[in-house]
Image (tube, helix red, strand yellow):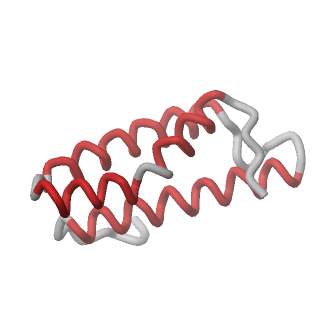
Amino acid sequence: KIILTDDSEIQLVRNLVKLSDVLSEVENDLYPNKLCDYLFETSQMFNKFYENCSVNNAETVELKASRLSLCTVTAGTIRLLMRLLGINVVERL
């Protein structure tokens, strides 16, 4: 269950659900730069979410789990986009 309490969470989720549409557009129109644009937008929205919403110190356990799930989904999306663009992802610094 995902709990959305902040506008930045809502914006991030709205952006993440556009992934299949973006991939379809890239496939149909053959414009790989759309992947770059979507990746950049996703990264910006995640940064805003992370800045505005405490994950480890969330008010409730449910909210913490929800935010961790959102982080996991975003990381998976970014990893997929980077792989599609041929960019290796470093798992840990």
Q: Residue at point 81% right, 48% down?
A: 63
- Work out whether residue 60 or residue 4 is closer to the camera in this orientation and state it: 4
In this rendering, the answer to whether 51 lies above or below 78 is: above
Furthest toward the left, the residue is: 30
* x, y percent for residue 86: 17, 70
* x, y percent for residue 64: 78, 51
The answer to whether residue 42 is left or right of residue 63 is left
Q: Residue at point 28% right, 60% down?
A: 24
The answer to whether residue 51 is left or right of residue 1 is left
The answer to whether residue 69 is left or right of residue 31 is right
Q: Residue at point 40% right, 37% down?
A: 44
Q: In which quarter of the image is the N terminus?
A: bottom right
Furthest toward the front, the residue is: 28
Looking at the rendering, which quadrant does residue 59 occupy? top right
In this rendering, the answer to whether 23 lies above or below 57 is: below
Numbered circles on residues, count: 0
* x, y percent for residue 72: 57, 62
Q: Residue at point 55% right, 61% down?
A: 73
Q: Quadrant of the C terminus?
A: bottom left
- Work out whether residue 20 or residue 80 is closer to the camera in this orientation and state it: 20
* x, y percent for residue 41: 35, 39
- Work out whether residue 1 or residue 61 is closer to the camera in this orientation and state it: 1
